[in-house]
Image (spheres, helix red, strand yellow):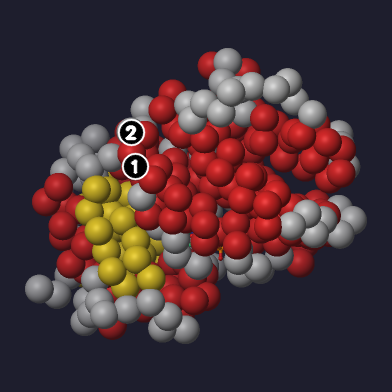
Amino acid sequence: MTKTIAILGAGAWGTTLANLARANDHQVRLWSRQGDLSLEDVVKNAEIVLSAISMKGVQDVALSVKSCQVSPQTIFVTATKGLDAKTTRTPSQIWQTEFPDHSVVVLSGPNLSEEISQGLPAATVVASKNTAAAQVVQQVFSSGRFRVYTNSDPVGVELGGTLKNVMAIASGVCDGLHLGTNAKAALVTRGLTEIIRIGKVLGAKTETFYGLSGLGDLLATCNSPLSRNYQVGYQLASGKTLTEILASLPGTAEGVNTCQVLMQISQEQNITMPITEQVYRLLETQVTPKQALDELMLRDTKPEYHQ
Ligand SMILES: NC(=O)c1ccc[n+]([C@@H]2O[C@H](COP(=O)([O-])OP(=O)(O)OC[C@H]3O[C@@H](n4cnc5c(N)ncnc54)[C@H](O)[C@@H]3O)[C@@H](O)[C@H]2O)c1
Ligand SMILES: O=P(O)(O)OC[C@H](O)CO
């Protein structure tokens, strides 16, 4: 059945998702703050409101939508991968707080938008506490080129996509320093352990991180030069400054902000995050890429716990 869908954020991801929904004959209205359409007109009578806004704009946009006329049945979908710098909340937590009586669905997976725009096959996950709402979103986007799975752990799915961005920066550094395949495998594997450790404290289920939105997205983002987060790390390794890199980056690299928020969470909740800590110190120019590597390699010896 044709759905009326409002997509907020006309960047790389919002535009790609709009095209996927249009290809399935849905009626899509795309809103951006630079565009001609008003937010009020775009969300009016929408059965689904999907946000692909960068993290820094999510809270403000959610508040603006709250002041618009939204149908009580509207399903909110969030495709943002980040954490709020002020509150440390995830995007779905922000949308659910502003719209407590609505279903909120998280859409996340190994989804480099450029590949999907080229018509290459990909899979993703739609997760919600409300299974029926997740199934509606699954039908909207599913096609022969985009396979959509449902999941009942929205926070786990969301955190998989968010936390891997920090590991993608580290992976870019690893490749930029030409440290080899063994080093990369060690980094990604220990990165997953670190993601699970943080994710469990933040309320996610461990098994979710072994799925598409966790391990899947970690593999995609840590291995692709198309990833903006990977590019940040790769170019830091070549000696560029973060300011120079961000000035020429096409779109948002959420891992930079996520890393700062994670350091705050690490201090408040006493969670050990060695890789995140070194990425943070590198972004803050407290260490060079080579020093960050040495710090990680020379940590105290320990058993290989996966927790
Ligand atoms: N590009 C991808 O491959 C991809 C895939 C999956 C998820 N994501 C996630 O989707 C989100 C958006 O990524 P993108 O690649 O489209 O980024 P982008 O930089 O191309 O677009 C970001 C969009 O957010 C809007 N925005 C930013 N701040 C705003 C504010 N204060 N108010 C209103 N609008 C604001 C921008 O105008 C733009 O439309 C990120 O969280 C990213 O991690 C991206
Ligand atoms: O370009 P990045 O680093 O934001 O990665 C895009 C997607 O999150 C990959 O799934």
Q: Is residue 144 above or below residue 255?
A: below
For ligand 2, tell me if the residue under mark 2 lies within 8 Å: no
**Percent x, y of residue 211:** 36, 50
Q: Which residue is mark 2?
A: 205
| Within-10-Å neighbours for mark 1: few <14, some 14–19, many 20+ | many
Q: What residue appears at the point 14 percent right and 75 percent down from the top-left corner?
A: 2
| Within-10-Å neighbours for mark 2: few <14, some 14–19, many 20+ | some
Q: Quadrant of residue 48?
A: bottom left
Answer left or right for 142 relative to 9. Answer: left
Q: CA distance from mark 1 to mark 2?
A: 6 Å
For ligand 2, tell me if the residue under mark 1 lies within 8 Å: no
On the question of residue 89 being in view, the answer is no
On the question of residue 210 being in view, the answer is yes
**Percent x, y of residue 44:** 24, 61
Q: What residue appears at the point 67 percent right and 30 percent down from the top-left corner?
A: 274
**Percent x, y of residue 278:** 74, 35
Q: What residue appears at the point 65 percent right and 68 percent down from the top-left corner?
A: 225
Q: What residue appears at the point 28 percent right and 54 percent down from the top-left corner?
A: 126
* Viewer-closest of 104 and 128: 128
Image quadrant occupied by the N terminus? bottom left
Q: Secondary structure at mark 2?
A: loop
Q: Is residue 304 above or below residue 141?
A: above
Q: Which mark is residue 119?
A: none
Q: Which mark is residue 208?
A: 1
Q: Secondary structure at mark 1?
A: helix
Q: Amino acid at mark 2?
A: Lys
Answer left or right for 69 relative to 251. Answer: left
Q: Quadrant of residue 102?
A: top left
